[in-house]
Amino acid sequence: MDIIEEKSNDIAVFKLNGSLDSNTSPAFEEKVVAIIEGGTSKIIVDFSGLDYISSAGLRVLNLASVKLKPSNGNLVLCCLQDYVREVFEIAGFDQFLPIVATMEDATAKFN
Amino acid sequence: MARVLEIALKSDYDELGRICISVNEFLESHELSPRVLYGVNLALEEILTNIFKYGYDDECKDHDISVRLEVEGPGVSVQIVDDGNSFDLEKAPEPDLSIPISERTIGGLGIHLVRNMLDTINYQRVDDKNIIELSIKGEAACSGKD
């Protein structure tokens, strides 16, 4: 698992490569919680390089979404493979997390 | 090319990395769709972590678990056998996805994903062992050669 973190203007972008599983989720949780507690309220997670996610990974995204609530922040997911998107739908997470096709669409959500 | 992979492991989280490597080496030697590869990995992670977490009343990490994978056409069948507490995957309560997310307890999510991502799930309790059998069908590859 590889996590690339970038900041463009006031938006934090996390690009995830590999697997977000029970082994790698704690490292992602640490980074995303740190950035929210540091005052960032706009987050994009780029899933283009992610080929595996389990319930442990979904829990981190849920936690991030809950932590962003008080600041009216938002978490946008982009570039999911079909079967990864299917998992978000099965979990019901597509009901509260905006999921878009491209990075441009994700950035546009904050404009 | 072997169509069957059998792995013996202990009830220890540290085993997951090793299992994952052998399983993916095996699956990648067959022509399976990314969705099928994903489903098998998901079932193994969610069910094994569930067994580690809830299967045993002692702290011992030395219980034997066996995993068997068999490639069947474009799909895969998975069998997991453990001697832990009885746990019927088919009857585990569904998480309530209608509750607002911030108020939701998120337990049971992994099993919910497995039940919906895989095509069949069968549970039996035999001789104090849990036998879980799952399958994911996958779509036959379009030959295009006809």
Image (cartoon, coloured by chain):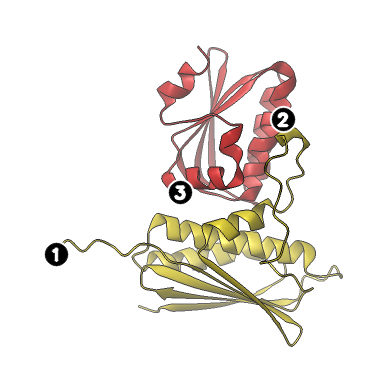
Chain colours: A red, B yellow
* Chain on which label 1 sits: B
Mark on residue A83?
3
Residue indicated by mark 1: B145
Kindly identify the residue that appears in the image at 54 percent across and 29 percent down.
A98
- Find the residue positioned furthest to the bottom: B127
Mark on residue A66?
2
Where is residue A102, by image quadrant?
Answer: top left
- Find the residue positioned furthest to the left: B146
Name the one closer to the observer, A61 or A7.
A61
**Three-letter amino acid code of the residue under disc 3:** Tyr
Q: Residues within 10 Å of mark 1 (few under 14, many from 20)?
A: few
Q: Is residue A110 left or right of residue B86?
A: left
Percent coordinates x, y for residue B77 in the rendering? 49, 73
Q: Which element type, helix, strand or loop, lies under badge 2?
A: helix
Q: Residues within 10 Å of mark 3 (few under 14, many from 20)?
A: some
Q: Is residue B10 above or below residue B39?
A: below
Q: Is residue A56 left or right of residue B74?
A: right
**Three-letter amino acid code of the residue under disc 2:** Val
Is residue B17 at least partly visible in the picture? no
Q: Is residue B80 above or below residue B144?
A: below
Q: Is residue B146 left or right of residue B73?
A: left
* Total labels drawn: 3
Is residue B80 at least partly visible in the picture? yes
Q: Is residue A62 above or below residue A86?
A: above
Using the rendered image, report if marks 2 and 3 lie on a common chain: yes
* Chain on which label 2 sits: A
Kindly identify the residue that appears in the image at 75 percent across and 33 percent down.
B102
- Find the residue positioned furthest to the front: B98
Percent coordinates x, y for residue B99 in the rendering? 73, 39
Name the one closer to the observer, B129 or A30.
B129
Whole-angstrom CA distance, mark 1 to mark 2, is 52 Å
